[in-house]
Image (cartoon, grey):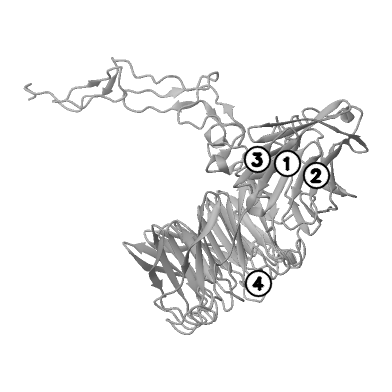
């Protein structure tokens, strides 16, 4: 049964516990210290350290100006889903709670239009009473709320509604005295209406096992699957601000530190860990103030993992290194390619900047190219940010001002062919703004280029470009954008899902910071969710650095003060993607089914030879909805010279049985005087082996 509304709590439920009795259901999200129970009185939450519980009690349901009280009836628990049936005049409402590895989800189902709609009422409203002295603070865009009280904070994440045709419907949260209301505009909608928001759960808080004052743990972060790395550039273990990096691995939903990385020749003020990159068993760590090539010339250290052990593999310094280049202020990895920015390089002009590309040849990292802007000028800081994906590299020049001090910023795109890198294009914002600083952050992957402009219109923006045509596809700005938030200070993308940091956002206090996630919909991007750490606070600057890998997002809070001032931390969140969003595995999706590369409404099809599809690419009319393929769509290609392709019949879900060519079909013609034709056997897909005549006169 589709849900009308899912007010999703940013809770972690792995591991989680469930215990049911006649009176209700007890839940626990151990990682966040939040326990919950669900019974006829509602959903009761017990945040860690709170003086009182928060109870979400469904009070009234109806239309604008016509709300009706509900009465709780039967409670059922089946397959991880607890459902409480509510009765109201002329209708009913189902309230439900779902727990699992993805977290705790609380929502509602309305099986049919409410009676008030027949009487001319407008919209659908579900009113929830907040018991326990909590109050709701709704975000500016109405898509999220903070519930504060009793020394605790509970967060409801972003809300969006979709009708049966997949059309998004307006939905918003409204705070009323002691209550939180969910409003959905169902005009023109086709029932059932469903809410399937992107759910983000804080999976872990990462911190050093030896935190110290001013370390700035998490100044830089990277993640690849079940491995994450955080830079700690002001770690003093090998001298003041010599730096380190910490590697963490995830197993069974638990993240633990695997290694502490330091340079073999560490020295004071190198700031090893200023930048980090990670791909599989290879990690790169930048030390932009290392002095091997001159004072503050910079270096990159490459580490490799064998089993669970990390070892220093290489130290990279440019052949033309020079003092104050700050090489490795930014770094990125893609397969056997590494790129590092050198924003202080003076070859073109003072601080015009450069970037260096290295390739792994055999077991050695070799400098392959030095990249500069064709129109580079002094102070452009080309190399401030870098990104690479295969044979495409993107270099940010945030202070590019077209000969002046405008600081519009730009992205320079380079491509590689036969080990030679060439400049392709300089990308600028179509509505470029003075001091926007496009290129302060960059990302490239899966055919898109993403650039952050954190000072655009004093709000910040993120621009998306197509990496083949180089056309600007979108400009992203949060629905609750506010002056000075610096949205776009950090960006990352995977599977065309975009994460962007807004470290000066003030939701949890001045400069507490937030992360926004945007998902692709019909060649556009929509804001799916905004999240912050459960214990976020003023001055943390959360999301100054971030990275996304599949359903996991890591964000830094390098000024977090949990241990001592500015010791720092990082947070890992897990996303559960909405129906129709790109995915890699079933656990990535709220629906629990990843089919044909998208989150599907049903675990159907997905085989190489069936007649079902859930993505447009595979033959469906809409991403996320499993459909029977039309007649004449090929479902099994020919496997050999005596095989024939099978096509769907538009009726059956399975591809027809494999049929071979009849036994009188010639599959290989005579190729010469001593050759003979081959004929299909009728029982095998392959043409018989080529045969030739023997003992026959040919001339």
Tell me the residue at 77%/49% (across/down).
143
Q: Secondary structure at mark 3?
A: strand
- Whole-number angstrom distance, CA of label 1 to CA of label 4: 46 Å
Disc sitting over residue 106 in the figure: 1
The x, y position of residue 502, in whole percent, is: 68, 62
CB of mark 2 within 8 Å of CB of mark 1?
yes
Question: Dot 2 surroundings within 10 Å: few (below 14), some, or many (20 or more)?
Answer: many
State the residue position of label 4. 407
State which quadrant residue 500 falls in: bottom right
Question: Dot 1 surroundings within 10 Å: few (below 14), some, or many (20 or more)?
Answer: many
Task: Of the two numbered discs 4 and 3 on the same chain, state the one appearing first in sequence.
Answer: 3
Q: Where 97 falls versus 693 (above or below)?
A: below
Q: Is 516 in front, or is 632?
A: 516
State the residue position of label 3. 18
Which dot, 1 or 4, sits closer to the camera?
Answer: 1
CB of mark 2 within 8 Å of CB of mark 4?
no
State the residue position of label 2. 56
CB of mark 4 within 8 Å of CB of mark 3?
no
Which dot, 4 or 3, sits closer to the camera?
Answer: 3
């Amino acid at each position: 049964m589709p849900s009308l509304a899912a007010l999703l709590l940013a809770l972690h439920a792995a591991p989680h516990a469930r215990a049911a009795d006649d009176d209700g259901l007890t839940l626990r999200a151990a990682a966040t210290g939040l326990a919950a129970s669900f019974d006829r009185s509602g959903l009761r939450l017990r945040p860690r350290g709170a003086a009182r519980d928060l109870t979400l009690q469904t009070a009234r349901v109806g239309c604008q100006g016509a709300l009706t009280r509900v009465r709780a009836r039967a409670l059922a628990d089946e397959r991880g889903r607890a459902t409480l049936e509510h009765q109201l005049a002329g209708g009913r409402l189902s309230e439900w709670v779902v727990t699992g590895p993805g977290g705790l989800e609380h929502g509602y189902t309305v099986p049919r239009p409410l009676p008030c709609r027949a009487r001319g009422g407008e919209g659908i409203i579900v009113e929830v009473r907040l018991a326990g002295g909590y109050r709701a603070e709704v975000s500016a865009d109405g898509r999220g709320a903070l519930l504060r009280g009793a020394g605790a904070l509970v967060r409801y994440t972003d809300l969006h509604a979709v009708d049966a045709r997949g059309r998004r419907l307006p939905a918003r949260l409204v705070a009323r005295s002691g209550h939180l209301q969910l409003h959905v505009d169902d005009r023109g909608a086709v029932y059932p209406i469903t809410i399937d928001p992107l759910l983000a759960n804080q999976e872990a808080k990462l911190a050093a096992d030896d935190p110290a004052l001013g370390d700035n743990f998490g100044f830089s972060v990277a993640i690849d699957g079940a491995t994450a790395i955080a830079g700690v550039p002001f770690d003093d273990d090998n001298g003041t601000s010599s730096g380190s990096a910490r590697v963490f691995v995830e197993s069974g939903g638990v993240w633990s530190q695997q290694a502490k990385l330091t340079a073999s020749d560490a020295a004071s003020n190198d700031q090893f860990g200023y930048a980090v990159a990670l791909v599989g068993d290879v990690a790169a760590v930048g030390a932009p103030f290392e002095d091997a090539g001159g004072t503050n010339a910079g270096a990159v250290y490459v580490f490799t993992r064998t089993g669970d052990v990390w070892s220093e593999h290489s130290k990279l310094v440019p052949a033309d290194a020079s003092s104050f280049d700050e090489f490795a202020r930014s770094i990125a990895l893609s397969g056997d390619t590494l790129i590092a920015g050198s924003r202080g390089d003076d070859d073109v002009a003072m601080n015009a900047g450069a970037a260096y590309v290295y390739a792994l040849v055999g077991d050695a990292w070799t400098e392959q190219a030095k990249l500069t802007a064709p129109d580079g000028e002094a102070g452009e800081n080309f190399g401030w940010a870098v990104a690479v994906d295969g044979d495409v590299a993107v270099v940010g020049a945030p202070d590019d001002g077209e000969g002046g001090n405008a600081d519009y910023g730009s992205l320079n795109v380079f491509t590689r062919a036969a080990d030679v890198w060439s400049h392709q294009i300089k990308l600028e914002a179509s509505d470029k703004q003075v001091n926007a600083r496009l290129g302060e952050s960059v990302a490239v992957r899966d055919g898109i280029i993403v650039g952050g402009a954190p000072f655009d219109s004093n709000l910040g923006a993120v621009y998306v470009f197509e990496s083949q045509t180089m056309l600007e596809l979108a400009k992203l700005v949060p629905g609750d954008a506010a002056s000075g938030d610096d949205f776009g200070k950090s960006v990352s993308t995977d599977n065309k899902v975009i994460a962007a940091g807004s470290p000066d956002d003030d939701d949890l206090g001045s400069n507490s910071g937030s992360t926004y996630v945007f998902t692709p919909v019909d060649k556009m991007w929509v804001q799916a969710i905004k999240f912050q750490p459960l214990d976020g606070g003023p001055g943390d600057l959360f999301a100054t650095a971030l990275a996304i890998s599949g359903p996991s997002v890591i964000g830094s809070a390098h000024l977090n003060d949990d241990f001592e001032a500015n010791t720092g931390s990082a947070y890992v969140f897990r996303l559960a993607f909405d129906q129709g969003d790109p995915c890699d595995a079933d656990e990535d999706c709220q629906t629990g089914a990843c089919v044909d590369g998208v989150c599907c409404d049903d675990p159907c099809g997905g085989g190489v030879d069936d007649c079902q599809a859930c993505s447009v690419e595979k033959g469906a009319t809409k991403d996320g909805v499993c459909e029977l393929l039309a007649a004449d769509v090929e479902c099994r290609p020919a496997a050999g010279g005596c095989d024939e392709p099978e096509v769907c019949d538009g009726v059956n879900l399975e591809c027809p049985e494999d049929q071979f060519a009849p036994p009188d079909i010639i599959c290989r013609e005579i190729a010469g005087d001593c050759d003979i034709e081959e004929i299909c056997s009728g029982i095998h897909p392959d043409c018989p082996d080529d045969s030739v005549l023997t003992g026959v006169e040919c001339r």
